[in-house]
Amino acid sequence: MEKKFGVYICTGCNIGESVNIEKLKKNTAGGGGVPADVIKEHPVLCSPEGLDIIKNDITAGTNTIIIGACSPRVKYEEFDFPGTIIERVNLREFVAWSLEPNTEPAQSAAEDYMKMGIIKTKKGDLPAPNILEDLSKKLLVIGGGITGLTAALEAANAGYEVVLAEKEAELGGWAAKLYKEVPREYPYEKLDEPVVFNKIKEAESHPNIKVFKSSVIEKTDGQPGLFDVTINTKGTSETIKVGAIIMAAGWKPYDATKLGHLGYGKPNVITSIQMEEMAKKGKIIRPSDGKEAKKVAFIQCAGSRDPNHLPYCSSFCCATSLKQAKYVREKNSDAIAMIFYKDIRTPGQAEIFYKNMQNDPGVLLTKADVTGISDSGSGSLYVEAENALLGEKIKVEADLVVLAVGVVPATRAPQEYLDGLTEAGKKGDDAKNTYITETPKPEFILNLTYKQGPEIPSLEGYYGFADSNFICFQYETRRTGIYTAGCVRQPMNMSEAQLDAAGAALKAIQSVEHVAKGMAVHPRAWDTTFPDPMMIKCTSCKRCTEECPFGAIDEDEKGTPFYRINRCRRCGTCMGACPERIVSFKDFSVDIVGSMIKGIEVTEDEFRIVVLACENDAYPALDSAAIKRIKLNANVRIIPVRCLGSTNLVWVTDAFSKGIDGIILLGCKYGENYQCHFVKGSELANYRFSKVKETLDKLQLESDRCSLMQVAISEYDKLPEMINDFVTRVEEIGPNPFKEF
């Protein structure tokens, strides 16, 4: 479209008190190359009167708007004008609140920011959604346990068609094997009947739910809105089209045969799973001789919280043992239940149930480390332990020992497979991929046809659980349109699993609705841009297909990459990966950012530092620092990027060729406590960063002129100092010699 520009500068919030507005307008007209008569100012641009100025100009034909005011992270609704190109220039936080007012450096910064905003709108275009045809809003739920049933019912009750696939012959999962449940209502004394059976009846009779039993997923092809899922039921295959998938495949108990040190293998040592089966049959007995068990010992964390087995807490084992201790007491009031624990963990209202059980004189709780189980010689067992409070060794006789075994996600790979992996998390030696560690899972549930593998990848540290970014959002996976819930995501109790299921159902509904409008899903929700590669220049190097965090790029039979556009999260990682620079978005491209960098005024007597800041954590942290009025070096120019993974190394070359003295890549933390919204953007940038030194060597520049910094959104108070220290180091190195050219 032919662009008609409108530039609007707010003089409120200290902006007018910090810079010369008339000089800024004049420079914007000259350096920015827009007519002076379209540059307007207002003391409160976000007020109804200020907004009317913009709206009236839009009515008169203005379609490209540059707003010099507050951060684009605030006043979004006020400055939202559909059908127009809008660029928000951050004069308040990055100039008025961060720099010394009424100084030449502050004036220069404001002029550079306005110029970059105009360049971006000149180079960019208005995005239009890419809506594919024949989209489906039907949902597939994999797993018919308490989580899957709840997710299916939540979605069905919201008016969506649901396909529910369960691998067993009957619905219910582990929940259907329970004798009783932990109390759900005050006063938390009486055990409840399993809720799952009512859910089974409701699901099987619901008009919006189609149930497949004894079924597995043979293949999952396509993308959100257009998933073609082949379900195999007792050898017969049927392919259905669905819009989104909820994986509620559940869990399995930890392999108790590995717990020989706790006595498993002895006739009278059973697991908590076997205890449920026993209670359901009516009697608590010794399996060795069928006699009633009058002394029952429960050993907590049987495999859990143990670096040699499961290093994590399995969440509901403590409450389960308390519940099973009540089984013992209810079936025989003279029986004794002894619980040996590391710590009792009963969060929420379950704490009241825990206290009620403490008050039962027949329930003995001992904080101790169990060191062994031995035979007494009379059919019973001795539990040998070290009392953690008194430091004394104890030996207690028991008729029956129950191991509270831990939770393993249904997706977890066998340990012998994991032991054979390289640090890269892949079979064989693939040095190129050692920058990210992933856990492949050979127990396939989804059987995806994705280039990046048949299952949802899980990062090291998640122990096979298909969880996601623990700080920013739940339920999301690295396979767009596929959401996880319940114990396949993380250990949780029955109540938590039902809440989790409702959340996953909502995310799945959001996904199909966004896809129907050509929009991205979280974290760039509502984004209608999409990558538009110039394939004629593609060399099929495969970097984009390998580095895309979400598997959005597949390859045809010739090895040429192509996008499954509804899988795309719009992070731009492919743009940063491409050595040929052929990937662009309407409002974000290698050319746009490169031109913005070239638009910065570089003088011989002043240093210039460019900060490429991730918009998810780094940019908000900079905003927060400004709100606190923490001063930033005036030589810094901040350019937001979608993710550090979108950073193309040509920007480094462009910047130094232009005469920029230093560059900071400012992104989210990665590693064990990663916070990247796009999973591995900062990590990828760090890997590519190793190439920067080669680039600088070619330019005969010092590698210290470029730095990658990690920052949490909460570390705003440290950030200005980090940047200012870098500027000082660059000043010590000296000016960029390319300034002379």
Image: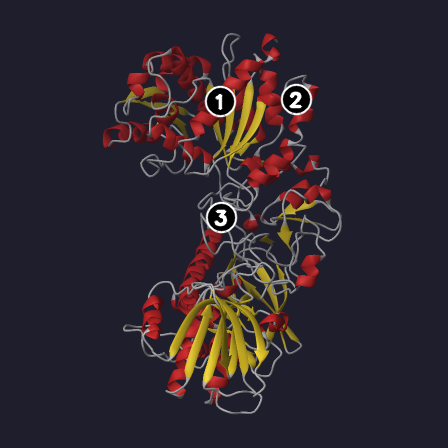
- In the image, what residue type sits under mark 3? Gly
The residue tagged 1 is 725
Q: Rounded to the nearest whole Å, what is the CA distance between mark 2 and mark 1?
A: 21 Å
Separation (CA) of disc 2 from disc 3: 41 Å
Quick one: label 3 or label 1, which is nearer the N terminus?
Answer: 3
Q: Image quarter for residue 692?
A: top right
Mark 2 and mark 1 in contact? Answer it, CB < 8 Å: no
Mark 1: few, some, or many residues within 10 Å (few <14, many ≥20)? Answer: few
Residue identifier under label 2: 696
Question: Is 616 on the left-hand or right-hand side of 38?
Answer: right
Q: In which quarter of the image is residue 15?
A: top left
Looking at the image, tell me whether mark 2 or mark 3 is earlier in sequence order.
3
* The C terminus lies in quadrant: top right
Q: Where is residue 642 in the image (x, y as percent from the top left)?
A: 51, 37
Regarding residue 599, the answer to whether it shows in the image is no
Q: Which amino acid does label 2 sit on?
A: Leu
Q: 568 or 737, which lies in front?
A: 737
Residue 332 horizontal/vertical position (percent): 40, 88
Amino acid beneath label 1: Asp
Mark 2 vs 3: CB contact within 8 A = no
Where disc 2 sits, the SS reads helix
Q: Where is residue 604 in the image (x, y as percent from the top left)?
A: 53, 8
- Name above or below for residue 172 compared with residue 511: below
Q: What residue does disc 3 label?
A: 518
Residue 725 visible, this angle: yes
Find numbered disc 1 in the image and state the secondary structure of the residue it sits on: helix
> At 66% across and 31% down in the image, what residue appears?
690
First in sequence, mark 2 or 1: give its number: 2
**In this view, 307 is above or below 357:** above
Label 2 packing within 10 angstroms: few (<14), some (14-19), many (20+): some
